[in-house]
Image: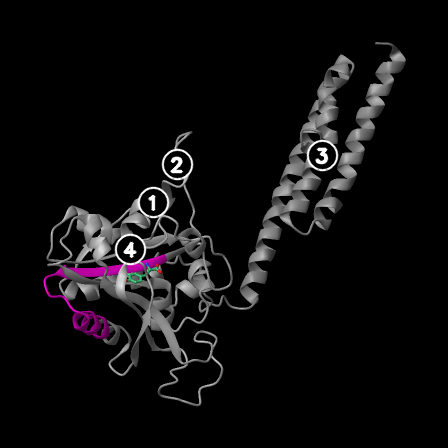
Amino acid sequence: MSEADTADVVTAFEQGLAEAAEGYAAAFGRATDEHALRAQNARLLGPAGSLTKLLKRMSQLPADRRREFGKRANELKRAIDVAFEERLSELARAEREAELSGPMLDVSLPGFGRLPGRVHLLSRVKHELLDLFATMGFDVADGPEVELHENNFDKLGFPPDHPATDMQDTFFMKGPPGSDPRATLLRTHTSTVQVREMLRRKPPLAVVSAGHVYRRDDDATHSPMFMQLEGFMVDRGVSFAHLKGVLTHFLRRLFGDDVPVRFRPSYFPFVEPGGEVDVGCGICQRWKRPDAGACRVCKGSGWIEILGCGMIHPVVFEQVGYDPETNTGFAFGMGIDRVAMMRYGVGDVGLLYSNDARFLTQF
Ligand code: DAH
């Protein structure tokens, strides 16, 4: 290194040390929080700090000056460290004092608790309904949601040209290539369990079953997936009086002894005679308050259609190999969503499927 270069390095050291020594105390004093203080410290002593960089050039100094500069630089470094630590504890003290003299901690504020899980309202109602029938001696059965066309339609007396797929807007499942595209489907009702249980067992029998069903419906009051409960009884001498008695008892247990119940004739291919049952609307309770205002749920009629029912059609017995001369029986099916809305005063079916904890935790 030339003499001139050596002189430059010496000057750079002198200047660097002087600049560092001059500014740090004020810079630390201006830092009002730990983050700012650490940033100031890093400008001198961090990996890219000015003093760090200077010390890396130590070997460029003439040998006879190294000791002296080294000593001065280390002393400065120590002084900066001390000032840094002092300012750090000063800031911590100030922060603590501000905390102590500030507003008290409000221990009554809500915490971040974890909500325990719970059974969904629809599942609760499903089990309540199954329990009610179980106490009347019905067995509880299950059936698959993916079904054969024949169990969903044919064996229940729907004729092959029946516009059932218009009536119930079915979801069909894709089968192997070349297979009948309508052979497998998502069941459109739980009446399939009648067929399955009757094929599997011999009368007398009384069975209930509940689960999901699917239809290509999707609007404000219909969901493409919903829940039904199916029940039926087969024996010798089962009459419409038994049907009426069982269903009236069930509906009174469910909605209260004073709820009005009415049976209306209706058509379903798998029952004869067939009917529908209405109960007084639990939302507006018009039978108690005839002047009740407009009700969204019953559309002002005061009645809610709650289930379909009837005497099992002889055709169904023939399909499952029961003698229609000796056996009689009744069947019924209902929407569990409807029942849940009525029982718990839910005015909007969408709430049951929107998974909003603010709604679901009310039950
Ligand atoms: N399966 C019918 C539906 O989904 C409901 C129904 C009506 C079921 C009458 C029955 C019955 O068992 O007897 O619309």
Front residue (pair 153, 80): 153
Amino acid residing under circle 3: Leu
Tell me which numbered mark, 4 or 1, is placed earlier along the sequence. 1
**10 Å crowding of disc 2: few (<14), some (14-19), many (20+):** few
Q: Nearer the viewer's eye, disc 2 or disc 4?
A: 2
Give the Cα separation between the discs numbered 2 and 3. 81 Å
Amino acid residing under circle 4: Ser
Give the Cα separation between the discs numbered 2 and 4. 22 Å
Q: Nearer the viewer's eye, disc 4 or disc 1?
A: 1
**10 Å crowding of disc 1: few (<14), some (14-19), many (20+):** some
Does ligand 1 reach within 8 Å of label 4's beta carbon? yes
Give the Cα separation between the discs numbered 2 and 1. 10 Å
Name the residue beneath numbered marker 3.
Answer: 44
The answer to whether any part of residue 343 appears in the image is yes
Q: Look at the image and say whether residue 229 sits in the magenta stretch.
A: yes
**Disc 4 element:** loop
Front residue (pair 47, 209): 209
Give the Cα separation between the discs numbered 3 and 1. 81 Å
Q: Are marks 3 and 4 in contact (CB under 8 Å)?
A: no
Q: Nearer the viewer's eye, disc 3 or disc 4?
A: 4
Name the residue beneath numbered marker 2.
Answer: 180
Residue 74's tag is none
Q: Which residues are magenta?
A: 227-249
Amino acid residing under circle 1: His
Seen in the picture, residue 105 relative to 285 is either above or below; the reply is above
The answer to whether any part of residue 128 appears in the image is no
Name the residue beneath numbered marker 4.
Answer: 191
